[in-house]
Image (spheres, rainbow, N blue to C red):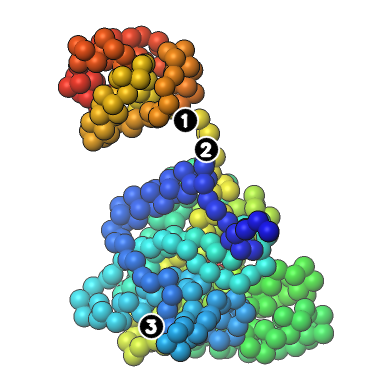
Amino acid sequence: MALKAVRGTKDIYGIDSEKFREIVNKAVEIFNNYNYEQIITPIFEETSLFQRGIGEGTDIVDKEMYTFIDKGKRSITLRPEGTASVVRAFLEHKMYGEKKLKRFFYYGPMFRYERPQTGRYREFNQVGVEAIGSYSPVLDAEIIAMGYDFLKKIGINDIEVQINSVGCPVCRKIYRDKLKSFLETKYDNLCEDCKIRYEKNPLRVLDCKVESCKKETAEAPIIIDYLDKDCKEHFEEVKKYLDIFKVPYKINPRLVRGLDYYTNTVFEIVTNKLGAQGTVLAGGRYNNLINEMGSKDVPSVGFAAGIERLMMLVDKEADEIEKGVYLAWIGENVKEYAFFISKILRENGIKVIIDFEEKSMKANMKKASKSKVTHAVIIGEDEKKTKNMILKDLETGEQELYDLENIIIKLK
Ligand code: ATP
Ligand code: MG
């Protein structure tokens, strides 16, 4: 039987790997402009980190984790998201001692045992950010602006920024009770998952993707009406700074996000181009997560974006011509010399395509024109003797003779 990649995983190659790299490179560039530094955390952690950090009662912890016992009898989990690990690292290395806002970005694979479908995999990649150490609503707005900026810069245009506030634990409790009494009247018509959510985490009923649940809860009370004074003010400031940063947004009162640790601002950037998997970037403020994991109260904001979903939205030309040379060598006795030259060119930062097999001039030129580089370098017996080489511009067809030193200058 032929071996295949495991269900829900995939290989990324060809044009897709180029897209992947461009998305990551752009993210790094933009996040750097906002003064974020990279953090690289392990891909697996102790299971309890995610149980505490993400919370029991969430889909991720209850159903989706890849957990196993290692040979040392530890319970290990492949990370399903990035925030818990970044926060663990922050606490473990006592970065709070530095008394300032820490801004991190990360990227890499995440693992969730979900039903695979378009834009939904069991191994997928995220790029994300976490800013730890500030209550300021300017931070919330700045992070949303950064996410928006990033999506624009990779060429994704049909997007909508949705924001909401889920308040603090105090006003959320009041809202939660209100919502529960509303849902009680609809209980029989809710889906099976929502019946459980009603008990465990009623806000998440608003997040349900099932049409009948959406309909039943259309008239549900909204949390913004229940925010206390501080939470309301915080939300107003976030909106004000979004205006200052020129980020268009829409308030979505049903936006609650899947995870429990969020406080105040939550946001998603969505597209209508990917069907049900329309959220490409999502995040919010979490003031209590760190408290939950350590003893410190460290207010933070973060987001994560799914790289595969972004890849589906960015266009890329398959045949972009790149700066570099196709090195054609004519005659078996110039082969060694040609390969020596290829090494010198590459050492000097020039991309070189060169074949191992001997070819006629004609066959070489045919390959050169297909190779998606700007130039061909031709080396035959004469060129070897005179230590020169022919440089051909593959676009104009112009040819000129150069020595090694000058061809390097010319190509750089
Ligand atoms: P969804 O509602 O789509 O399940 P989520 O709330 O679980 O998303 P987050 O945990 O906030 O998503 O992750 C942030 C982003 O990561 C999502 O917006 C999405 O782009 C991407 N993502 C999440 N799960 C998957 C997956 N299984 N496959 C591919 N991308 C994913
Ligand atoms: Mg999910």
Amino acid type shown at disc 3: Ile
Residue 130 relative to residue 317: left or right: left
Rendered residue at 20%/15% (across/down): 387
Amino acid type shown at disc 1: Glu
Q: How many marks?
A: 3
Q: Which residue is mark 2?
A: 316
Q: Which residue is mark 1?
A: 320
Classify mark 1 as within 8 Å of ligand 1 or not, answering yes or no.
no
Q: Nearer the viewer, residue 159 or 23?
A: 23
Which mark is first along the chain, 2 or 3?
3
> In the image, which is nearer the foreground, mark 2 or mark 1?
1
Q: CA distance from mark 3 to mark 1?
A: 46 Å
Where residue 8 appears, as percent x and y from the top left, is: 62, 63
Classify mark 2 as within 8 Å of ligand 1 or not, answering yes or no.
no
Residue 293 relative to residue 379: left or right: right
Q: Which residue is mark 3?
A: 290
